[in-house]
Image (spheres, rainbow, N blue to C red):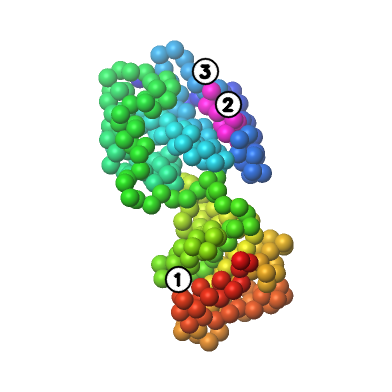
Amino acid sequence: MQLIQQWPDALRARHDAISVDGWQRFAVGDFEGAARAFESAYRLVLGEQPEGQRYHKGEALHNRGVALLWGGDRQRGLEETLAGFIEDAASLAEENPRFEELDRPAAHNLIYVFGLAGPPLAAFALQVRSEIGSGRLLPDPHALLATPAATEAATPPTGAPVPRTIGTLDSLPERRVFIGGWYGRLVDTLRPLADYLVTIGYDGLMAADFGVPSGWGEDEVMFPLLTSAQRAIFEVSESAGQVEEIADVPETMRTPQRILAVFDRANAPKPGISRGQTLAKLERWKVEPLGYGDLEELKRIVRGWLPP
C-alpha cells in the first residue's frame, strides 16, 4: 500500500502551524501571502514523503486554490484545486471503491465555484484511479494536469454561466452596487435589476451570483462584496437575509446617497421588513424606503438615485 494514513506528529504540527498562518493572512485580505503559506504547507508534506509511499496532501492544495482565486488568479486557482481533486482520487483509490472524491471539498469548488461539469470530473477521477491501480506512485498530483482528461475536466460547459468570484471583480469600487433582498425575488426582480445596472455602467453585486467554497456560508461571500461596493440597494418588501446585510453596512455607507431601500407596493403598502430593528436603522440613516409598482418603475427610481 502506497498511502500512509497517519502523518508523524511533528509533521502534522508543522503543517498545521503553516496553515493557521495562511488563514490568518487570508482573513486580512493578504491572499498572495496566504497562497504562499499554503504552498509551503504542501511542499513540506511533499518533501517528507518516504520513498515509494505518499501522504495525502489535498488540504493544502484546496486551500491554496481558494487563496489564489480570491486573489484574482482564477486559472492558477483552478489548477491547484484540480490538483487537490487528483489527490483525493489517488488516496481514495486505495481506500474506497466508491467515487467519494466527488463529494469532497475540491470537487465541490470545481463544480460550484469554477463552474465545471460533473461527468468529465468523474471520468478524470477514473483515470487517476487507474494510474494508482497500475502501480504508479504519483507523489505530486501536478504531473497529471497536462493530460487530455484533465484539460477536458477543467473546461466549463459551453454556454453555461460561470459563477463570479470576488477575486476577479474588474469594476471600479465606485461603480459597484451591492443588491440585497429575499431570493424569492431573485429571478423576477433582483437579477433583472443587476442586468439593468450593467446597461447604465454599474456592476450589480449579488451573493447568489458568486460561488461559495466548500465549508463556507453565503454570508462569508456577502460581506466582502458589501464592503467592496460604495453603494447598496436593498429590496425590503419581505424580511430575509437583507436584515443581516443592512446590519453589516459599513459606517461610510450609512447615508441616503449610498443606500437605497425599495419595496413592492403591489405586495403591501409598506415595507415588510422588521420595523423595530431594520427600519429603525434605515430611519436613523435618513434612508426612506421607496415603493415601486413594477420593474420599470424600479429602474427609474434606481437611475434617478445613482450618479450619472
Q: In which quarter of the image is the C terminus?
A: bottom right
Figure quadrant of residue 302 = bottom right
Quote the CA–CA distance across marks 1 and 3. 53 Å
* Residue identified by numbered label 3: 47
Q: Which of marks 1 and 2 is nearer the N terminus?
A: 2
Q: Give the range drawn in magenta.
A: 34-43
Q: Which of marks 2 and 3 is nearer the N terminus?
A: 2
Secondary structure beneath label 3: helix
Q: Tell me which residue sits at (47%, 15%) in the image.
A: 50
Badge nearest the viewer, 1 or 2: 1
Q: Is residue 142 left or right of residue 93?
A: right
* Residue identified by numbered label 1: 189
Whether residue 195 is in magenta: the answer is no
Q: Which of 22 and 285 is in front in this view?
A: 285
Tell me the number on the disc at residue 40: 2
Q: Which amino acid does label 1 sit on?
A: Thr
Asked if the residue at tag 2 contacts the one at tag 1, i.e. Cβ–Cβ closer than 8 Å, the answer is no
- Crowding around mark 1 (Cα neighbors within 10 Å: few <14, some 14 to 19, many 20+) is some
- Crowding around mark 2 (Cα neighbors within 10 Å: few <14, some 14 to 19, many 20+) is some
Q: What residue type is labelled 2?
A: Ser
Q: Tell me which residue sits at (55%, 48%) in the image.
A: 170
Tell me the number on the disc at residue 253: none
Figure quadrant of residue 149 = top left
Q: In this view, does 91 lie to the left or right of 218?
A: left
